[in-house]
Image (cartoon, rainbow, N blue to C red):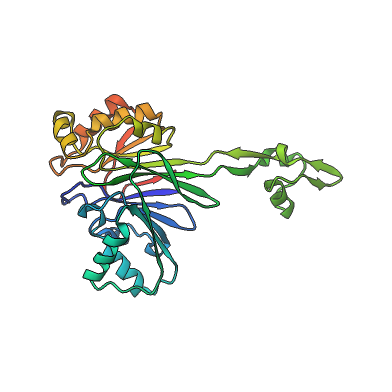
Amino acid sequence: MKLVFLGTASSFPTRERNHPSLYLDIGPEALLFDCGENTQRQIRIANLSPTKISKIFLTHWHGDHVLGLPGLLQSFELNGRKAELSIFGPDKTKERLHYMTKSFEVRVGYRINVTEIAAESKIKRILQTPDYEIHATKTSHTVPCLAYTFIERPRVKINTEFLKKYGLAAHPLVGELQRGKDIQWKGKTIKAKDATYIKPGKKITYILDAVYDEKLAVFAKDSDVLICEATFSKELEADAKEKGHMTAQQAGKLAKKADAKQLIITHFSQRYRDTSELLAEAKKEFKNTIAARDFLEIKI
């Protein structure tokens, strides 16, 4: 899997930072989290495939998180897209998307399936596939807003060292072991439980536009990667709360309480051209922190 940060600014884009968007490449498909202005151009610059995007997850309907949608949807059409596109967002996403596409004369020949998620404190599983799940919960912001967690399902892997004892490598029977079935090989029984092991899936949590709330640590519990907003420095904590945001220090505290493995801070105010101050703040609370930048790629 690969994470690509397409935009790391907050309300105002800068020369270095575009409006928020995150591209998660999981192999056969890609998931897009938020779609700020110029997202499709960022996708091109990053040399990513827009056609791989199967699902878009919107945190909320402030312009800096959604104004890239009309152009991206229109480009899908111009490129002859036929595959269904799923869009997830808070209440009134269908209505807002309707008016957005109508205003810009965005006509699409592919199906758009919209799922609205009520902004509630409880954690909801909003999507379940054979390979992963997506969970959502509300954040405290100035409008209804959601945080998302991607949870990869555990995978059955082959213990190649164990199979070497039997002289068994690339063979269709290996697939039977992976499906949990014992096999016969050269007069011997090889048990699936001995020849395989379970590899835990990865967990990636995405929290943007949120006042600090320890309930979010429960949502992000044991994340392999926690992507969290750090809009302001600790000196502006009062401003952050009033505007529905977090400081870098609070992002670090959240990662620590969540027992995350790695924290990536993003969604920086334009006042911080250099994010080193914010990074230092977060690292005081949680050492394994990095500051995102546009086009940063993280392999997971």
Q: Is residue 288 visible?
A: no
On screen, residue 164 versus residue 272, left or right, reads: right
Q: Give left or right: position of 274 versus 201.
A: left
Q: For residue 270, what is the image quadrant?
A: top left
In the displayed structure, 24 sits above or below 292; it is below
Can residue 116 be seen at all in this image of the molecule? Answer: yes
Residue 275, x across and y down, in percent: 20, 38
Tell me the residue at 67%/47% (across/down).
Answer: 178
In this picture, residue 123 sits left or right of residue 231: right
| Residue 160 percent location from the top left of the image | 67, 42
- Rendered image quadrant of residue 233: top left
Q: Nearer the viewer, residue 23 or 35?
A: 35
- For the C terminus, the image quarter is top left
Question: What's the residue at 62%, 43% (across, down)?
Answer: 157
Direction from residue 271 to residue 283 in the image, left or right = right
Residue extending farthest right = 187
Residue under the point 53% across and 50% down: 131
Give the x, y percent position of residue 201.
Answer: 52, 41
Total labels: the figure holds 0
- Across and down, in percent, residue 195 comes to 71, 40
